[in-house]
Image (spheres, rainbow, N blue to C red):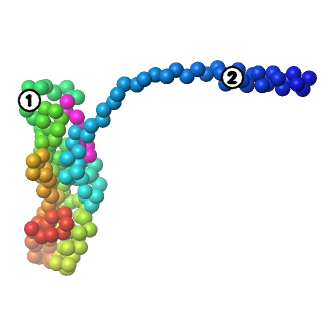
Protein backbone atom coordinates (compact mmCIF):
# COMPACT_ATOMS: atom_id res chain seq x y z
CA UNK A 1 0.00 0.00 0.00
CA UNK A 2 2.90 2.34 0.78
CA UNK A 3 4.43 1.71 -2.63
CA UNK A 4 1.14 2.40 -4.34
CA UNK A 5 0.62 5.77 -2.58
CA UNK A 6 4.27 6.74 -3.12
CA UNK A 7 4.05 5.88 -6.84
CA UNK A 8 0.83 7.95 -7.19
CA UNK A 9 2.57 10.88 -5.50
CA UNK A 10 5.58 10.66 -7.84
CA UNK A 11 3.37 10.39 -10.93
CA UNK A 12 1.27 13.32 -9.74
CA UNK A 13 4.27 15.55 -9.16
CA UNK A 14 5.96 14.70 -12.45
CA UNK A 15 2.79 15.43 -14.40
CA UNK A 16 2.60 18.89 -12.77
CA UNK A 17 6.18 19.63 -13.79
CA UNK A 18 5.33 19.11 -17.46
CA UNK A 19 2.00 20.90 -17.35
CA UNK A 20 3.44 24.39 -17.85
CA UNK A 21 4.65 24.92 -21.38
CA UNK A 22 6.42 28.25 -21.80
CA UNK A 23 5.98 30.02 -25.05
CA UNK A 24 8.93 32.09 -26.22
CA UNK A 25 7.91 35.45 -27.65
CA UNK A 26 10.19 37.96 -29.25
CA UNK A 27 9.58 41.51 -28.04
CA UNK A 28 9.87 44.57 -30.18
CA UNK A 29 12.89 46.82 -29.76
CA UNK A 30 12.53 49.80 -27.43
CA UNK A 31 14.72 52.87 -27.80
CA UNK A 32 14.96 55.22 -24.81
CA UNK A 33 16.33 58.70 -25.44
CA UNK A 34 16.84 61.58 -23.08
CA UNK A 35 15.92 64.61 -25.13
CA UNK A 36 16.68 67.28 -22.54
CA UNK A 37 19.72 65.77 -20.82
CA UNK A 38 21.85 68.84 -21.64
CA UNK A 39 19.41 71.11 -19.79
CA UNK A 40 19.45 68.90 -16.71
CA UNK A 41 23.23 68.59 -16.75
CA UNK A 42 23.64 72.37 -16.95
CA UNK A 43 20.98 73.44 -14.44
CA UNK A 44 20.51 70.58 -12.00
CA UNK A 45 22.92 70.99 -9.13
CA UNK A 46 22.72 69.14 -5.85
CA UNK A 47 22.92 72.31 -3.73
CA UNK A 48 19.79 73.92 -5.17
CA UNK A 49 16.63 73.92 -3.09
CA UNK A 50 14.19 71.03 -3.49
CA UNK A 51 11.42 73.08 -5.22
CA UNK A 52 13.95 74.28 -7.79
CA UNK A 53 15.12 70.75 -8.56
CA UNK A 54 11.57 69.42 -8.80
CA UNK A 55 10.42 72.10 -11.22
CA UNK A 56 13.54 71.76 -13.37
CA UNK A 57 12.93 68.02 -13.67
CA UNK A 58 9.30 68.67 -14.65
CA UNK A 59 10.50 71.05 -17.37
CA UNK A 60 12.99 68.47 -18.68
CA UNK A 61 10.38 65.68 -18.68
CA UNK A 62 7.69 67.76 -20.40
CA UNK A 63 6.97 66.46 -23.90
CA UNK A 64 5.50 69.19 -26.06
CA UNK A 65 5.07 66.81 -29.03
CA UNK A 66 2.29 64.87 -27.26
CA UNK A 67 0.09 67.88 -26.51
CA UNK A 68 -3.09 68.85 -28.36
CA UNK A 69 -1.74 72.22 -29.48
CA UNK A 70 1.37 70.71 -31.11
CA UNK A 71 1.77 71.28 -34.85
CA UNK A 72 4.79 70.83 -37.07
CA UNK A 73 4.34 74.32 -38.52
CA UNK A 74 5.76 76.22 -35.54
CA UNK A 75 9.47 76.69 -34.91
CA UNK A 76 9.20 76.79 -31.12
CA UNK A 77 6.72 76.56 -28.27
CA UNK A 78 6.83 78.64 -25.09
CA UNK A 79 5.55 76.89 -21.98
CA UNK A 80 5.33 78.39 -18.46
CA UNK A 81 5.66 76.33 -15.29
CA UNK A 82 4.60 77.77 -11.92
CA UNK A 83 4.95 76.83 -8.27
CA UNK A 84 4.45 79.12 -5.25
CA UNK A 85 8.22 79.61 -4.91
CA UNK A 86 8.93 80.54 -8.52
CA UNK A 87 8.45 79.93 -12.20
CA UNK A 88 10.21 78.71 -15.31
CA UNK A 89 9.48 79.86 -18.85
CA UNK A 90 10.85 77.33 -21.34
CA UNK A 91 11.07 77.46 -25.13
CA UNK A 92 10.92 74.07 -26.87
CA UNK A 93 11.75 73.45 -30.51
CA UNK A 94 9.55 71.37 -32.84
CA UNK A 95 11.25 68.14 -31.68
CA UNK A 96 10.56 68.82 -27.98
CA UNK A 97 14.12 69.85 -27.10
CA UNK A 98 14.63 72.78 -24.72
CA UNK A 99 16.18 75.73 -26.55
CA UNK A 100 16.23 78.23 -23.67
CA UNK A 101 14.73 78.92 -20.27
CA UNK A 102 14.30 81.82 -17.90
CA UNK A 103 13.93 80.81 -14.26
CA UNK A 104 13.14 82.87 -11.17
CA UNK A 105 12.66 81.61 -7.61
CA UNK A 106 11.91 83.83 -4.61
CA UNK A 107 12.95 83.27 -0.99
CA UNK A 108 14.38 79.77 -1.32
CA UNK A 109 16.96 78.05 0.84
CA UNK A 110 20.47 79.28 0.00
CA UNK A 111 23.33 76.85 -0.65
CA UNK A 112 25.93 76.45 2.10
CA UNK A 113 28.65 78.16 0.02
CA UNK A 114 26.52 81.29 -0.43
CA UNK A 115 25.52 81.45 3.24
CA UNK A 116 29.11 80.95 4.37
CA UNK A 117 30.46 83.67 2.06
CA UNK A 118 27.79 86.11 3.25
CA UNK A 119 28.52 85.37 6.89
CA UNK A 120 32.26 85.92 6.40
CA UNK A 121 31.91 89.18 4.49
CA UNK A 122 28.83 90.63 6.21
CA UNK A 123 28.71 89.09 9.71
CA UNK A 124 26.03 91.32 11.29
CA UNK A 125 23.76 91.59 8.25
CA UNK A 126 20.46 89.78 7.82
CA UNK A 127 19.00 88.49 4.54
CA UNK A 128 15.58 90.04 4.03
CA UNK A 129 14.88 88.60 0.56
CA UNK A 130 16.61 86.50 -2.04
CA UNK A 131 15.99 85.76 -5.70
CA UNK A 132 17.56 82.82 -7.53
CA UNK A 133 17.78 83.33 -11.30
CA UNK A 134 18.85 80.88 -13.98
CA UNK A 135 19.10 81.59 -17.68
CA UNK A 136 19.73 78.60 -19.90
CA UNK A 137 20.54 78.59 -23.57
CA UNK A 138 21.22 75.49 -25.63
CA UNK A 139 24.29 77.12 -27.15
CA UNK A 140 25.67 79.08 -24.16
CA UNK A 141 24.76 76.81 -21.24
CA UNK A 142 23.35 77.95 -17.90
CA UNK A 143 24.08 81.08 -15.90
CA UNK A 144 22.99 80.95 -12.25
CA UNK A 145 23.09 83.74 -9.71
CA UNK A 146 21.49 84.95 -6.51
CA UNK A 147 20.27 88.49 -5.87
CA UNK A 148 20.15 89.12 -2.13
CA UNK A 149 18.83 92.05 -0.14
CA UNK A 150 20.69 92.50 3.16
CA UNK A 151 19.72 94.63 6.14
CA UNK A 152 21.64 95.79 9.22
CA UNK A 153 19.50 98.02 11.37
CA UNK A 154 18.33 100.84 9.11
CA UNK A 155 20.96 100.14 6.40
CA UNK A 156 20.12 98.00 3.38
CA UNK A 157 22.21 96.78 0.48
CA UNK A 158 21.82 94.48 -2.49
CA UNK A 159 24.36 91.80 -3.31
CA UNK A 160 24.70 89.55 -6.34
CA UNK A 161 26.45 86.14 -6.04
CA UNK A 162 26.88 82.94 -8.01
CA UNK A 163 26.09 79.48 -6.63
CA UNK A 164 29.72 78.96 -5.53
CA UNK A 165 29.58 81.91 -3.11
CA UNK A 166 31.57 84.35 -5.26
CA UNK A 167 30.42 87.95 -5.30
CA UNK A 168 29.63 89.39 -8.72
Q: Residue 150's x, y, as percent? A: 14, 71
Residue 46's place in the image compared with 167, above or below, is above
Instruction: Look at the picture and state if 107 lies above or below 57.
Output: below
Does residue 142 appear anywhere in the picture? yes
- The mark tally for this picture is 2
Circle 1 is placed at which residue position?
74
Residue located at (11% from left, 66% from top): 160
- The answer to which of 8 and 102 lies nearer the viewer is 8
Q: Earlier in the sequence, mark 1 or mark 2?
A: 2
What residue do we see at 15% from left, 64% from top?
A: 162
| Magenta stretch, residue numbers | 57-65
Residue 83 or residue 56, whichever sits in front: 56
In space, the residues marked 1 and 2 are separated at their CA atoms by: 62 Å
- Residue at the (8%, 26%) spot, across then down: 73
Label pair 1/2, CB-CB below 8 angstroms: no
- Taking the magenta stretch, the answer to whether it contains residue 82 is no
| Rendered-image quadrant of the C terminus | bottom left
SS for dot 2: helix
The residue sitting at 90% across, 26% down in the picture is 2
For label 1, the crowd category at 10 Å Cα-Cα, with few meaning under 14, some 14 to 19 and many 20 or more, is few
113 relative to 89 in the view: left or right? right
Asked whether, in this view, residue 161 is left or right of residue 20, the answer is left
Residue for badge 2: 16
Residue 96, percent from left and from top: 18, 35
SS of the residue at dot 1? loop
Amino acid sequence: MKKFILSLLVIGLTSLAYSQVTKVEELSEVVVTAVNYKYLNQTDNKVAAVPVQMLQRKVAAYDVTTKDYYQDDYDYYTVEFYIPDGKIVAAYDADGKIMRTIEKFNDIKLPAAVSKALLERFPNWEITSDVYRVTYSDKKGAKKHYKLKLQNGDKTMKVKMNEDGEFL
